[in-house]
Image (cartoon, grey):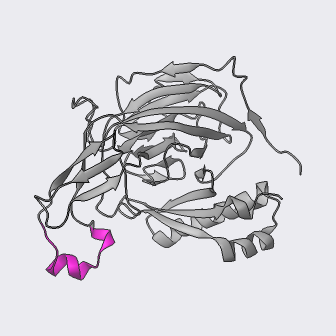
Amino acid sequence: MKVLFTLILVNACWAETHRFEPQQFYNSFSGAHNPVLRIKPGDHVITYTIDAGGVDSKGVQRGQGPNPETGPFYIEGAAPGDTLIVHLLRLETNRSTGFSASLLAPYTADPGFLRSEALREAKRATWKIDKQRGIAYMDPGDFKGPRIELPLRPMLGCIGTAPPNKAAIPSTYPDNFGGNMDYNGMGAGATVMLPVFEPGALFFLGDGHARQGDGEVVGSAIETSLDVEFSVDLVKGKKINWPRLENADFIMVLGSSRALNEALQHATTELMRWLMADYGFDERGASLLMGQAMEYEVSNVVDPEFTVVAKMRKKYVERR
């Protein structure tokens, strides 16, 4: 198969590890923001996020909500038409509490139920985080029912590059540059592929979650601050149309749109392109495989644009 692109890999002896202490946080994804740090392909960055309301690990208000972002990081050599590769090496909660909404969001339930049966008093719920035990929990008090105890699954609600056309997109939005996709698979061990639209890519991350269910159906996750470690690589001359994600078991594409069916179309089309470009399928072969092996997840149905994840198990596409 003809190689159409070059992956920039840096010898380990040349790679650097940066410990970055954020001084300011942005509430939009934009190429107009000055880079906070310049890094090279192969470099590691150790940093942190504040929570969706702007509070840090010590309970100090460091930014304003919604979803203040750490970054942007300028990646040396990145140019429009390239693909940025981000390896999420470590995500850990760094405080003992998080918060969430406590009622279903409007787009997730029947309007009739919300009008006539549902509670109308919005309350913020406070979750306790026990990092040593690896759980988040809430005891009855403001709700009726048994204690809720769930395993921690730290993830980033927001991750993206500067959007195209010199746009400034609020940090509540997902789109083709990434953004507020709120996918609970965006955790440690995942590799994220993002399109580059601006010189240096200008990479942002934020909106840390202790865990989140599919769809983010109450309109938030367990919102908290996170310690983050990541590294970057760069694929020169390879253009992708939507964010891609890879873990040990799946290749995935995240498509976003105000219409849920259109988000699914974006994700499905980009996965088809991926199978044809990198896995040796023609359109018919990719279609046959997808028809019988596709999996989907609804990432979020509460943001200004909804996100759908199209997934293919690696065991079906890896060459034997």
Q: Is residue 91 left or right of residue 318?
A: left
Classify 251 as above or below 259.
above
Q: Which quadrant of the view contains residue 273? A: bottom right
Residue 300 horizontal/vertical position (percent): 41, 61
Q: Name the image quarter holding the C terminus.
A: bottom right
The residue stretch that appears in magenta: 106-120
Q: Is residue 293 above or below residue 267?
A: below
254 drawn magenta: no
Asked if one can make out residue 32 in the rendered structure from this viewpoint, the answer is: no
Q: Is 70 rendered above or below residue 238? A: above
Residue 150: image location, x then y, percent: 33, 55
Residue in the foreground of this view, choosing between 190 and 6? 190
Looking at the image, can residue 177 be seen?
A: yes
* 272 relative position to 307: left or right: right
Residue 256: x %, y % from top left: 49, 60
Image point (79%, 41%), residue name: 5
Q: Quadrant of residue 255?
A: bottom right
Q: For this rendering, which residue is in front, 145 or 117?
A: 145
